[in-house]
Amino acid sequence: MSIQCYAAFEAKAELRPHTYEPGPLGPYEVELAITHCGICHSDIHLVDNDWGISTYPLVPGHEIVGTVRQCGEQVRHLSLGQRVGVGWQSGSCLQCEWCVRGDETCCAQKEATCVGRAGGFASAVHVDSRFAHPIPDGLASEHAAPLLCAGITVYTPLKAGVQPMSRVGVIGVGGLGHLAIRFAAAFGCEVTAFSTTADKQEEAHRLGARHFVASRDARPPEKLAGSLDFLLSTVTVPLDWAAWLNVLRPRGTLWFVGASPGKIDIPPMALIVGNKSVRGSGIGPRATMQEMLEFAARHNIAAQGEVLPLAEVNAAIRKVRENRARYRIVLAT
Ligand SMILES: [Zn+2]
Ligand SMILES: [Zn+2]
């Protein structure tokens, strides 16, 4: 059956209705009837060909929630009608050292849901069932969709890098940052939110931040020196990273999930004194994805945002481009 979707036909273009034939279902694939798909900044980078990897027509969308409509002959763990989610990664070799370790994000043969194949701004999609994650009953589909990319992106570093008593700083209160505040607060951490927008203070507290720092400076306030154990940067602007490192306590980590432009200019002594680290990561492996979804359901962590019909995809993308989304937009079919 042909799939209705919205596609960009050239870089930076508006999306237009499009139809494609998905071909026969592979033995491990499932066909999902899509109900919801979040809009991530990466979708817009793909539409614009910012990374030089886009091919057109390009169907974006990698925060997909849908129900299983058809199963390939080898699919045993999913059933017809089951609700599942698909994030950025939709494939890996499942046999290499990294896949065997359960770290599919490092697989050399990893595949992305909407790079070189059609994504989720569509009525349906064919995906590898082993990258289709059952959504716990307690999570509404519109709340679950952004967790599949934004949620896993911030949950993975927090899981790896913080303890219940950690003092955690989240730089940027947006699509990623608002979820990072919620997860870190639910972990039991004392959270400080950093934003350039003073009117996000009340919101940050409501999300679970104990402290809020509004500043448009590239440097954090001097008085915060040596006060935090973990800093998660979700922003895509260049900041004075050496100054931010100074906010960390001994053994603290500055962790990047936001692709800030420019260089991280840090003198080695800033790491040596106090045993500090700088790390980065994107998304997370399958086991962490399933855990994150269950954690979110247990703690009632929902991505905040608005739901718009898929037919309004261009207006929705404009809103994200103009930074007017608070914090995530989810398209509903
Ligand atoms: Zn994404
Ligand atoms: Zn592999």
Image (cartoon, rainbow, N blue to C red):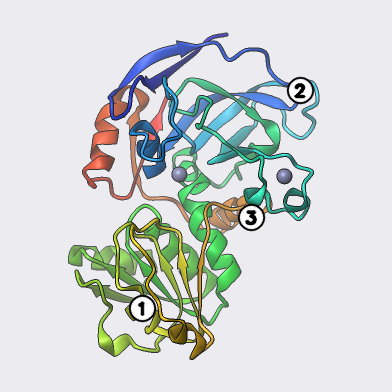
**Disc marking residue 242:** 1
Secondary structure type for disc 1: helix
* Residue 324 visible in the picture: yes
Residue 72 location, x and y as percent?
Answer: 74, 21
Answer left or right for 95 relative to 291: right
Q: Residues within 10 Å of mark 2 (few under 14, many from 20)?
A: few
Q: What amino acid is labelled 1 in the image?
A: Ala
**Disc marking residue 288:** 3
Q: What amino acid is labelled 2 in the image?
A: Pro
Answer left or right for 154 relative to 219: right
Residue at the location (44% across, 39% down)? 142
Residue 43 location, x and y as percent?
Answer: 40, 37
- Quarter where residue 48 is shown: top left
- Marks 3 and 1, the one that precedes in the sequence: 1
Q: Is residue 102 above or below residue 118?
A: below
Q: Is residue 224 above or below residue 42?
A: below
Q: Residues within 10 Å of mark 3 (few under 14, many from 20)?
A: some
